[in-house]
């Protein structure tokens, strides 16, 4: 029986000038579909040479010592090859989850050479293939109330029923989960949607927006994920258009974790109510998670008025996640109301 393979290897880099060690860096190398360094990119004119392989046994997180010497190649290109010498691609132990408050499974379809394909937004793991990757993802292909959708603004029934937002402040706890930037919110905040209480868990981002309005996506969207005591999920989607800098995003964007699986925290506080537009009418419909396992029965509420974010703020997100959007799904007769 083969030993358990790791999700990551931690390499300890002794950066040398040829005579003495100048400093030590730690480099986390992710072992997934494509092995790549995740943290600390040393000078591009240096290459890592393996010094001690004895500690590179396949356990989940292990340190190895590498000696860095002058060479024409880039160390960030060489480290993945070192990792491949000792481990094969492995299943991810953590990820985006469902993107809406519960953890998704990453048991995935086996392809050539025994490699696993994980859900993603392109290639073999793209949305068109989600239902094939795992039986738990079957609704991604067979569901009749899937999200996102296109929202036509003409001819909608108008049923005014304001959402009651009861938000407190929260410390900043941000995670890069490999699929998006997610801010986990301190307990105690909630919204009353359709007379039902939903506790705010987290909010995360996609660019462009997943739900579209009259066929057009917004430049970015924040999905504010709530959960009722009975387990029902309620999402409040706030659409962004490029414009002036968004003050609410500033402390979050200044703490963006750039690499998958990394987190940042700050004692600075944010107030979720400041993410919302002043005018709070919204489009309501029943849909699903927009990521595997594509669970249905999600209470969707898309704010009708957009807020602004600067193009630099939008670009800061897309530079980390160039693709983060599931295509629009069929409406299949579902009713959309303007509330």
Image (cartoon, rainbow, N blue to C red):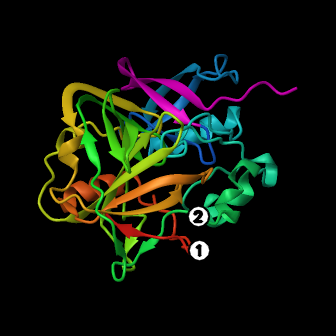
> Would you place residue 199 above or below residue 268 in this image?
below
| Disc 1 secondary structure class | loop
On the image, the x and y values in percent for residue 170 come to 25, 29
Q: Mark 2 points at which residue?
A: 145
Q: Is 274 or 179 nearer to us in this picture?
A: 274
**Is residue 73 shown to the viewer in this render?**
no
**Residue designated by label 1:** 332
Q: Do the residues labelled 2 and 1 touch (CB within 8 Å)?
A: yes
Q: Position of residue 210 (x, y in %)?
A: 43, 64
Q: 179 left or right of 313?
A: right
Residue 256 falls in image quadrant: top left
Residue interval drawn in magenta: 1-30
Distance in Å between CA atoms under marks 2 and 1: 7 Å
Residue closest to the far bottom: 154
Q: From what the image shows, is residue 141 above or below residue 180?
A: below
Task: Look at the image and tell me in which quarter the N terminus lies.
Answer: top right
Q: Is residue 193 left or right of residue 103?
A: left
Horizontal and vertical percent position of residue 202: 38, 39
Q: Is residue 138 magenta?
A: no
């Amino acid at each position: 029986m083969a030993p358990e393979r790791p999700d990551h290897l931690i390499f300890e880099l002794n950066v040398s000038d040829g005579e003495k060690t100048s400093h030590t860096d730690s480099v986390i190398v992710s072992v997934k579909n494509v092995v790549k360094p995740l943290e600390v990119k040393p000078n591009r004119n240096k290459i890592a040479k393996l010094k001690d392989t004895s500690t590179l046994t396949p356990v989940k997180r292990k340190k190895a010592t590498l000696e860095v010497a002058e060479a024409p190649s880039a160390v960030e290109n060489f480290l993945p090859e070192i990792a491949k010498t000792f481990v094969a691609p492995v299943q991810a132990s953590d990820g985006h989850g469902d993107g809406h408050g519960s953890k998704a499974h990453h048991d995935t379809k086996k392809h050539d050479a025994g490699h696993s394909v994980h859900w993603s937004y392109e290639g073999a793991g793209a949305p068109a293939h989600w239902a094939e990757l795992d039986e738990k993802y079957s609704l991604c292909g067979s569901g009749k109330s899937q999200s996102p959708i296109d929202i036509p603004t003409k001819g909608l029934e108008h049923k005014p029923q304001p959402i009651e937002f009861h938000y407190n402040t929260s410390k900043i706890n941000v995670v890069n989960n490999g699929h998006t930037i997610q801010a986990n919110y301190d307990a105690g905040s909630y919204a009353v949607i359709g007379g039902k209480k939903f506790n705010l868990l987290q909010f995360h981002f996609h660019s462009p927006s997943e739900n579209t309005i009259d066929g057009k996506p917004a430049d970015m969207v924040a999905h504010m994920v709530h959960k009722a005591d009975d387990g029902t999920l309620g999402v409040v989607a706030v659409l962004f258009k490029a414009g002036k800098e968004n003050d609410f995003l500033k402390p979050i964007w200044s703490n963006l974790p750039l690499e998958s699986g990394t987190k940042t925290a700050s004692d600075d506080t944010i107030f979720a109510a400041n993410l919302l537009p002043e005018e709070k009418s919204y489009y309501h419909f029943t849909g699903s998670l927009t990521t595997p396992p594509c669970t249905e029965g999600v209470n969707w509420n898309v704010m009708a008025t957009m807020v602004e974010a600067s193009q630099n703020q939008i670009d800061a997100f897309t530079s980390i996640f160039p693709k983060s959007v599931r295509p629009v799904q069929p409406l299949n007769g579902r009713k959309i109301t303007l509330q």
